[in-house]
Amino acid sequence: MNKYQKIPEAIIDLHGYTTWRAKMELDKLLNEHKYSFIRIITGKCSYREHGPILGPFVKKYLEKKNLKFNQAKIQNGGEGALEVYITDRKKK
């Protein structure tokens, strides 16, 4: 493990969630105001004919909340996971 690698304070796995349910779970998690770094697992959804839905939805959701995020490292989920930094969050 990289000595500078930050460990998430919470991990939420949204596999199989609808966008509505994912939004509800993310709202609930963010409204707790407990975490400064979380990992959201959306999955890659490589089997869908028209590509993934949940990953792009979660990215737009985070952008609307003005939250900084990036794709997780390969060992932490790669394309199917996002690392979210909440410390610089602007309240909405």
Image: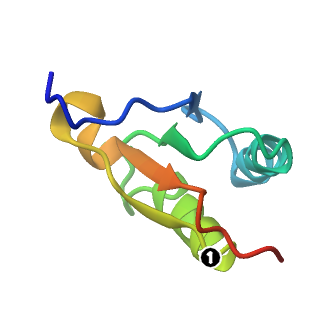
> Which residue appears farthest toward the front when viewing the image?
3
Residue 77, image x and y in percent? Answer: 30, 34
The residue located at (40%, 29%) in the rendering is 7
Q: Judge left or right: residue 35 versus residue 42.
A: right
Q: Judge left or right: residue 54 versus residue 80.
A: right
The residue located at (70%, 53%) in the rendering is 19
Residue 23 or residue 8, whichever sits in front: 8
The residue that mark 1 highlights is: 66
> Which residue appears farthest toward the top when viewing the image?
1
Q: Residues within 10 Å of mark 1 (few under 14, many from 20)?
A: some
Exactly how many numbered labels are in the figure? 1
Which image quarter is the C terminus in? bottom right
Q: Judge left or right: residue 13 versus residue 34.
A: left
Which of the 4 quarters of the picture holds residue 12?
top right
Q: Vertical placement of 46 versus 89: above or below?
A: above
The residue located at (67%, 78%) in the rendering is 64
Residue 51, image x and y in percent? Answer: 37, 59
Q: Which type of secondary structure does the marked residue at label 1 adopt?
A: loop
Q: Vertical placement of 7 versus 53: above or below?
A: above
Residue 62 or residue 57, whichever sits in front: 62
Residue 66, image x and y in percent? Answer: 62, 76
Which of the 4 quarters of the picture holds residue 75?
top left
* Colour logic: rainbow
Q: Vertical placement of 41 versus 72: above or below?
A: above
Residue 17, image x and y in percent? Answer: 66, 38
Which image quarter is the N terminus in? top left
Q: Vertical placement of 7 versus 36: above or below?
A: above
The residue located at (42%, 48%) in the rendering is 83
The kind of residue tagged 1 is Asn
Residue 60 or residue 69, whichever sits in front: 69
